[in-house]
Amino acid sequence: SEKSFSAGHNRLHIDIDLEGKSLPGRWANGAIAIPAISVNEFESSPRVVKTLVTLDEANEATVALNSWMETNEQSPEYVRLTEEQAGQILQQPARKSKSLLMALCHWRRLNMVKGDTPGNMHFVPNQRRRTARLTV
């Protein structure tokens, strides 16, 4: 059955497997990989986070990352993005892309993990957010 997820001015249509199988951009329980940021979460953020990104920018980033996982048939548990890869997906300049990634880490939508080489970091969807279900 088709469900839709809305963030800002973008809309993402996602097919949900009601049998609970893992789908691209979704955890096995059907929860969206990177849930949108709520107004309350954004408003309760430190000023430095709100200065770097807007709520719409943050939610557009979640839509872009979820859409990329869906389009490229990537299950969230296997996604490891470098800063450069994420920047290409977000289609933002490097500085803005980094700000968005760090903000999504602040809101626990992404985790930063060590990469293969010193100083190289990867970004992965936060598996603790698996329980955030899509509401329609």
Image (spheres, rainbow, N blue to C red):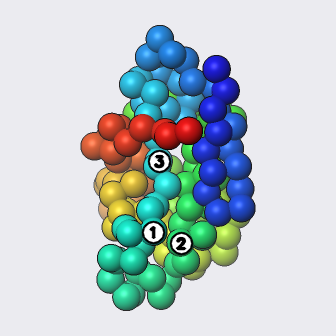
In screen coordinates, is 123 left or right of 58?
Answer: left
Give the spatial CA distance, label 1 vs label 3.
16 Å
- The quarter holding residue 70 reads top right
The residue sitting at the left extreme is 128
Residue 41, x across and y down, in percent: 37, 68
Residue at x 64%, y 63% (from the top left corner):
8
Could you tell me if residue 111 is visible in this image? yes
Work out whether residue 18 or residue 86 is closer to the camera in this orientation and state it. 18
Q: Going from the N terminus, do you reach mark 1 or mark 2 first? A: 1
Quadrant location, the N terminus: top right
Work out whether residue 110 or residue 7 is closer to the camera in this orientation and state it. 7
Q: Which residue is mark 2?
A: 55
| Disc 2 secondary structure class | helix
Within 10 Å of disc 1 (Cα), the crowding (few <14, some 14-19, many 20+) is: few
Q: Amino acid at mark 2?
A: Leu
Give the spatial CA distance, label 1 vs label 2.
7 Å
